[in-house]
Image: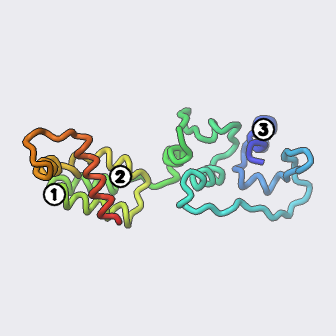
């Protein structure tokens, strides 16, 4: 039914003005032909199944299906302003359908000016646990140096060495501590 929606959007000039959800008000699914045809009667009961936010990409696909009008392919569904996005989540962000993480980014930037690794990691964990950032991995990438700024010395003392610790080992240890804090 979904790929047939792409087909009808390529062939029917009226269909492109509807989201997948709205299509049910104007078209009906013909099971024998496996295609959409114009609705003959006005009354209809149609629904798009609920998908929980925890379902990941399926949730973001459903979000796009309720907002994007007239896509003709999967690539078209995941595109916004002539940019094709690699995931449904990224496409939702580009469309402005999700909150971005600017508030959490600003919070971590401000805290980075006055706080060291441990308290910053606790703040990051609070943000993960209670604020549900849309892209926690990007927050980690942007702030991992600050979140792990005191871990090199800590790892040196744990390993009883004077040698510099590899940066990736420091980041891994930081993620380990964050995981422990979240558990």
Give x and y (percent) for residue 81.
54, 36
Q: Residue at 88%, 53% (x, y): give it.
A: 39
Give x and y (percent) for residue 15.
77, 44
Q: Residue at 53%, 60% (x, y): give it.
A: 54
Q: For the residues marked 2 and 1, what is the alpha-carbon distance in whole angstroms? A: 19 Å
Give x and y (percent) for residue 7.
78, 38
Q: Residue furthest top?
A: 82
Q: For the residues marked 3 and 1, what is the alpha-carbon distance in whole angstroms? A: 55 Å
Q: Nearer the viewer, mark 3 or mark 1?
A: 1
Q: For the residues marked 3 and 2, what is the alpha-carbon distance in whole angstroms? A: 38 Å
According to the picture, the residue beneath numbered tag 2 turns out to be 102
According to the picture, the residue beneath numbered tag 3 turns out to be 7
Give x and y (percent) for residue 172.
28, 47
Does the residue at mark 3 contact the one at mark 2 (Cβ under 8 Å)?
no
- Label 3: which secondary element: helix
Residue toward you, 57 or 26:
57
Q: Nearer the viewer, mark 2 or mark 1?
A: 1
According to the picture, the residue beneath numbered tag 1 turns out to be 115
| Vertical comparison of 172 with 72: above or below | below
Residue toward you, 160 or 37:
160
- Label 2: which secondary element: helix
Q: Residue furthest left?
A: 162
Q: Residues within 10 Å of mark 1 (few under 14, many from 20)?
A: some
Q: Is residue 22 left or right of residue 148?
A: right
Mark positioned earlier in the residue sequence (3 or 2): 3
Residue toward you, 97 or 153:
153
Task: Please tell me the numbered disc located at residue 18.
Answer: none
Mark positioned earlier in the residue sequence (2 or 1): 2
- Label 1: which secondary element: loop
Mark positioned earlier in the residue sequence (3 or 1): 3
In the rendered image, the quadrant that contains the C terminus is bottom left
Q: Residues within 10 Å of mark 2 (few under 14, many from 20)?
A: few
């Amino acid at each position: 039914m979904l790929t047939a929606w792409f087909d009808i959007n390529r062939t029917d000039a009226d269909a492109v003005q509807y989201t997948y959800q709205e299509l049910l008000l104007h078209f009906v699914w013909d099971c024998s032909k496996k295609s959409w045809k114009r609705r003959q009667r006005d009354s209809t009961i149609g629904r798009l199944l609920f998908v929980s936010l925890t379902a990941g990409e399926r949730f973001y696909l459903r979000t796009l299906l309720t907002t994007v009008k007239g896509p003709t392919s999967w690539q078209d569904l995941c595109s916004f302003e002539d940019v094709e996005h690699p995931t449904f989540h990224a496409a939702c962000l580009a469309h402005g359908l999700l909150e971005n993480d600017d508030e959490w980014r600003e919070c971590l930037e401000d805290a980075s000016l006055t706080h060291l690794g441990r308290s910053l990691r606790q703040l990051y964990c609070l943000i993960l646990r209670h604020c549900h950032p849309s892209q926690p991995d990007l927050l980690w990438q942007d702030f991992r140096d600050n979140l792990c700024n005191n871990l090199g010395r800590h790892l040196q003392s744990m390993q009883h060495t004077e040698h510099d610790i590899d940066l990736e080992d420091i980041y891994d240890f930081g993620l380990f501590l964050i995981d422990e804090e979240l558990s």
